[in-house]
Image (cartoon, rainbow, N blue to C red):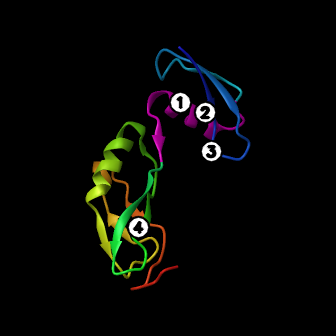
């Protein structure tokens, strides 16, 4: 199978061509660094994305609080992740980087807030 992957590890955005049947026999062309090799292989066999969204918050003038995972999670869990956070409601005050879940969806990745809100703070 052939796949073209645009690497997002650094600003170069290398277009990496991957010709593969298995992880072990993958042939790559167009990468600019070793990190690009690892990224392209992972993208073909275990694609991951950083999950970003919003959860409800009470005790603040805002209704929603932005959140994200601290590392990428398997791409096939993104819909499940969106469904899982529907039941999350935080209470102000909340600090940026506050951990909501230490092991989000069993991935060993944390789900954290990305904004500081004091009680009643509209920011």
Residue indicated by mark 1: 41
Please state the extent of the stretch shown in magenta in the rendering.
31-49
Dot in front, 1 or 4 = 4
Q: Residue at x 29, y 67 (%)?
A: 89
Mark toward the start of the polypeptide (1 vs 3): 3
Q: Nearer the viewer, residue 5 or 81?
A: 81
Q: Helix or strand or loop: what does disc 1 sit on? A: helix
Instruction: Characterize the magenta stretch by its predominant secondary structure.
Output: helix
Q: Is residue 6 left or right of residue 72?
A: right
Q: Helix or strand or loop: what does disc 2 sit on? A: helix
Q: CA distance from mark 2 to mark 4?
A: 38 Å
Mark toward the start of the polypeptide (2 vs 4): 2
Could you tell me if the residues under marks 1 and 4 are in contact, i.e. CB atoms within 8 Å?
Answer: no
Dot in front, 2 or 4 = 4
Residue indicated by mark 3: 9
Residue at the outermost left position: 87
Q: Nearer the viewer, residue 23 or 44?
A: 44
Disc number placed over residue 37 in the picture, else none: 2
Q: Is residue 92 left or right of residue 116?
A: left
Disc number placed over residue 82 in the picture, else none: none
Q: CA distance from mark 1 to mark 3?
A: 13 Å
Q: Helix or strand or loop: what does disc 3 sit on? A: loop
Mark toward the start of the polypeptide (4 vs 3): 3
Could you tell me if the residues under marks 1 and 2 are in contact, i.e. CB atoms within 8 Å?
Answer: yes
Q: For residue 28, which quarter of the picture?
A: top right
Mark 4, Cα crowd under 10 Å, few <14 / some 14-19 / many 20+, is some
Q: CA distance from mark 1 to mark 4?
A: 36 Å
Q: How far across and down, in percent of the image, does residue 114 sit?
A: 48, 67
Q: Residue at x 46, y 18 (%)?
A: 22
């Amino acid at each position: 199978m052939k796949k073209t992957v645009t690497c997002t590890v650094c600003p170069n955005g290398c277009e990496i061509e991957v010709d593969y049947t298995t992880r072990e026999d993958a042939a790559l062309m167009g990468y600019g660094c070793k990190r690009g090799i690892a990224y392209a292989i992972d993208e073909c066999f275990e694609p991951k994305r950083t999950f970003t969204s919003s959860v409800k918050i009470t005790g603040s003038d805002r209704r929603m609080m932005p959140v994200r995972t601290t590392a990428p999670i398997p791409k096939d869990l993104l819909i499940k992740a969106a469904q899982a956070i529907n039941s999350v409601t935080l209470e102000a005050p909340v600090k940026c980087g506050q951990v909501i879940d230490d092991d989000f969806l069993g991935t060993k990745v944390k789900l954290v807030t990305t904004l500081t809100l004091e009680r009643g703070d509209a920011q």
